[in-house]
């Protein structure tokens, strides 16, 4: 089977890492895989190329650029793709436009969020584009409920977890970051964008009792300049961010919106409890009192109180950490399961594509 995975860019984002995982695993299954970035390349593009996976970058600047569907259709025709699997709105629009020009292929999209960051015109174009897909995979119930009911939507919880972290993961991660075993460590990971709410974490720190704790933030993005020098230790992007989460006593996810976030899943696999805002699909990952603590969005005071509570109570941290690992196991939130469900979606989409007039 020849599969084209189309996304916007190939930087260190949650959706981009999922594209990387699917590309690698599909190739391992014997599929011929092409990864297309509609706008730009990035570090993941280099990793894929090193793994022998073909990557093509279209370099578009606007999703409605008339040259985009022509360039993408030519690329898909050359690859002779049986399945085109799109990720993120700009890629969805490009695939939908190209579908009218290119070869007949099954079209699948994974919708990672409700499109809250999109402009009004882009959201209209995106919603129209979604009607051109044979299968729509929503990453959470929250995302599914945000989509038009007439779409053929299935919920598929993505996961990049291969195994639970081994017993020595904490010591190894702390050594990599130069942290002592005694230090209280709070960690956050994500794109430095207003929607991730890291400004709320800065405000929360000013209200915390545990002022001596190390508060580490892994990631990069447009908000970096606004976050520098305000109490967070900005570590930049890290290819091994998932492994480094094991160094934390508490992982914080203060987002204003989420589809089905991967950061708390990685924290759970490492047995680290999470403090998270109750927004979108984040409430489907973090269960209050079972594997972490949920707090109201836009509330630095609530974030501070929850972080302080966990830093003050080692037994609570242990109980929630064990609950986190147990939930990964019982719900089978693993990378290999994501692949199996995705292949089934391809099968259904191909049946629909072949039966379409």
Image (tube, helix red, strand yellow):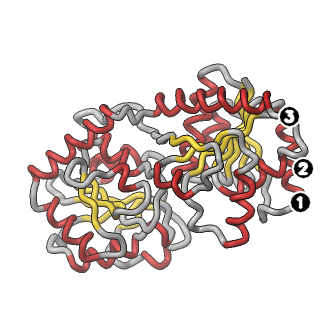
Judged from the image, the secondary structure of the residue bearing numbered disc 1 is: loop
CA gap, disc 2 and disc 1: 8 Å
Q: Where is residue 337 in the image (x, y as percent from the top left)?
A: 47, 29
Q: Which numbered circle lies on residue 357? A: 3
CA gap, disc 3 and disc 1: 26 Å
Locate residue 106: give its quadrant: top right
Is 263 situated left or right of 326 in this image?
A: right
Q: Around disc 3, counting alpha carbons within 10 Å, would you say few (fewer than 14), some (14 to 19), or many (20 or more)?
A: few
Q: Around disc 2, counting alpha carbons within 10 Å, would you say few (fewer than 14), some (14 to 19), or many (20 or more)?
A: some
- Residue matched to label 1: 66
Label 3 or label 1, whichever comes before in sequence order: 1
Locate residue 213: give its quadrant: bottom left
Residues 112 and 27: in front is 112
Is 290 situated left or right of 25 in this image?
A: left
Q: Position of residue 33 (x, y in %)?
A: 70, 31
- Residue matched to label 2: 70
Q: Which residue is drawn at 77% across and 48% down?
A: 95
Label 3 or label 2, whichever comes before in sequence order: 2
């Amino acid at each position: 089977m020849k599969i084209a995975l189309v996304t916007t860019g190939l930087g260190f984002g949650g959706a981009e890492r999922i594209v990387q995982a699917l590309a690698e695993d599909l190739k391992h299954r014997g599929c011929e895989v092409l990864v297309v970035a509609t706008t730009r390349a990035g570090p993941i593009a280099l990793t894929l190329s090193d793994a022998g996976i073909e990557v093509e970058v279209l370099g578009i600047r606007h999703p409605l650029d008339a040259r985009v569907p022509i360039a993408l259709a030519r690329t898909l025709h050359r690859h002779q793709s049986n399945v085109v699997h799109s990720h993120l709105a700009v890629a969805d629009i490009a695939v939908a436009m190209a579908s009218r020009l290119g070869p007949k292929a099954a079209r699948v999209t994974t919708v990672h969020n409700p499109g809250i960051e999109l402009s009004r015109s882009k959201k209209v174009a995106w919603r129209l584009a979604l009607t051109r897909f044979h299968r729509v995979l929503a990453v959470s119930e929250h995302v599914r409920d945000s989509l038009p009911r007439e779409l053929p939507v299935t919920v598929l919880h993505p996961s990049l977890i291969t195994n639970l972290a081994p017993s020595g993961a904490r010591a190894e991660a702390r050594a990599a970051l130069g942290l002592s075993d005694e230090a209280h460590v709070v960690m956050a990971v994500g794109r430095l964008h207003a929607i991730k709410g890291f400004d709320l974490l800065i405000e929360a720190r000013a209200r915390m009792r545990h002022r001596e704790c190390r508060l580490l933030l892994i990631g990069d993005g447009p908000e970096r300049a606004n976050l520098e020098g305000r109490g967070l230790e900005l570590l930049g992007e890290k290819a091994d961010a998932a492994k480094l989460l094991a160094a934390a006593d508490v992982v914080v996810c203060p987002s204003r919106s989420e589809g089905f976030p991967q950061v708390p899943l990685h924290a759970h696999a490492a047995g680290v409890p999470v403090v998270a805002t109750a927004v979108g699909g984040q409430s489907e990952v973090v269960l209050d009192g079972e594997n972490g603590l949920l707090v109201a969005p836009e509330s630095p005071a609530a974030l501070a109180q929850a972080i302080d509570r966990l830093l003050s109570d080692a037994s609570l941290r242990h109980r929630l950490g064990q609950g986190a690992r147990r939930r990964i196991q019982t719900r089978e939130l693993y990378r290999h399961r994501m692949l199996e469900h995705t292949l089934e979606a391809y099968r259904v989409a191909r049946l629909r594509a072949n039966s379409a007039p």
